[in-house]
Image (tube, rainbow, N blue to C red):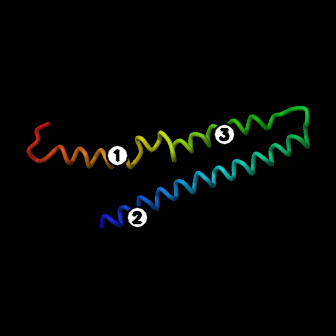
């Protein structure tokens, strides 16, 4: 049963990582297309930077949620805290 739970957590983690890399690949491809479109239609104006920056903020937030600070208070943290509290608070503890 524990092995199944570990497997499911690992599978979910792999899906999160794959989702980020998919997001990154789409970001690079679409923004490369926008950059080319910008150069072909209005070479003197560099408007491509606005969608690049806007979407980039979303990509950074996604990356943080997968690899960075979002992991700190994420599901794994919750599970550790639950186990910690369950270990400390036995049936005889009055709180």
- Point out the frontmost of discs 3 and 2: 2
Above/below status of 75 relative to 69: below
Q: Could you say whether the residue bearing mark 1 is in a helix, strand or loop?
A: helix
Mark 2 surroundings: few (<14), some (14-19) or many (≥20) residues within 10 A? few
Q: Residue at x 75, y 49 (%)?
A: 30
Q: Could you say whether the residue bearing mark 2 is in a helix, strand or loop?
A: helix
For residue 37, side relative to residue 64 (left or right): right
**Precedes in sequence: disc 3 or disc 1:** 3
Residue 64's x, y, as percent?
Answer: 53, 41
Q: Residue at x 57, y 54 (%)?
A: 19
Q: Identify the image quadrant of residue 47.
A: top right
Q: Are marks 3 and 1 in contact (CB under 8 Å)?
A: no
Q: Quickly name the residue at label 1.
A: 78
Q: Residue at x 86, y 45 (%)?
A: 37
C-alpha gap between disc 3 and disc 2: 32 Å
- Point out the frontmost of discs 1 and 2: 2
For residue 60, side relative to residue 70 (left or right): right
Mark 3 surroundings: few (<14), some (14-19) or many (≥20) residues within 10 A? some
C-alpha gap between disc 3 and disc 1: 29 Å
Q: Could you say whether the residue bearing mark 3 is in a helix, strand or loop?
A: helix
Image quadrant where one finds the C terminus = top left
Q: Residue at x 61, y 53 (%)?
A: 21
Residue 70's x, y, as percent?
Answer: 47, 41
Residue 66's x, y, as percent?
Answer: 51, 47
């Amino acid at each position: 049963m524990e092995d199944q739970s570990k497997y499911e957590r690992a599978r979910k983690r792999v899906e999160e990582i794959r989702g980020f890399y998919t997001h990154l690949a789409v970001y690079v491809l679409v923004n490369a297309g926008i950059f080319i479109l910008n150069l072909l239609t209005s070479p003197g104006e560099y408007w491509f930077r606005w969608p690049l920056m806007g979407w980039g903020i979303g990509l950074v937030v996604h990356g943080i949620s997968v690899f960075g600070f979002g992991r700190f208070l994420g599901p794994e943290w919750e599970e550790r805290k639950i186990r910690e509290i369950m270990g400390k608070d036995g049936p005889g503890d009055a709180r």
